[in-house]
Amino acid sequence: MTHLQPEIGNWFEDLESGQLFEVVAIDELQQTVEVQYLDGTLDEFELSHWQALPVIGAAPPEDSNVAYGMTAAEQDPNTSETEFSKGLSPLDTMEGESFSGTDESLF
């Protein structure tokens, strides 16, 4: 098995647990690699231990920003207002149950 070098921003899959994670920092002085899993959990490995990890390179998940508590649309500064209905917040555009006779008005 070829050992992959950790690089910030690269995604990997742990073959034992099936978890995806991103390399978020490399501390050359301390010889550590910091990773973040999709649920936001941070972990740190010694560079010497990295080579023994059962990991393979992986493509970033569809919404790789979920670990940071934001969707890609929320985090991207280039998202234009026209991508959402004008005058409505993203919450207003979410589908939900609708009941007739509620106090919501159409004006």
Image (tube, helix red, strand yellow):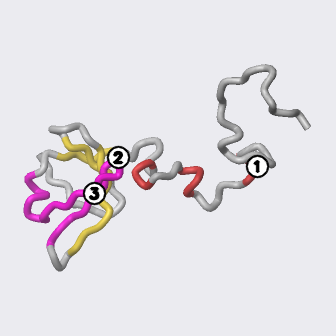
Q: Quick check: 6 above or below 92?
A: below
Amino acid at dot 3: Leu
- Mark 3: few, some, or many residues within 10 Å (few <14, many ≥20)? some
Total tally of numbered discs in the picture: 3
Residue 102 image point, x, y percent: 78, 26
Whether tag 1 and tag 3 are in contact, CB under 8 A, the answer is no
The residue beneath circle 2 is: 39
Secondary structure beneath dot 3 equals strand
Residue kind at label 2, given as amino acid type: Asp
Q: Which residue is mark 3?
A: 42
In-front residue for pair 22/58: 22
The residue depicted at 62 percent of the width and 61 percent of the height is 77
Mark 2–mark 3 Cα distance, whole angstroms, equals: 9 Å
Q: Residue at x 53, y 50 (%)?
A: 72
Instruction: Report whether 45 appears left or right of 93.
Output: left
Badge number at residue 21 = none
Q: Check disc 1 and report the residue beneath it.
A: 82
Whichever of labels 1 and 2 marks the residue nearer the N terminus, that label is 2
Left or right for 34, reference 94: left
Mark 2 residue element: loop
- The magenta span reads 31-52
* Residue sticking out furthest to the right: 107
Residue 103 among magenta residues: no
Q: In the rendered image of this protein, does residue 103 appear above or below residue 34?
A: above
Which mark is in front, 1 or 2? 2
Q: Quadrant of the C terminus?
A: top right
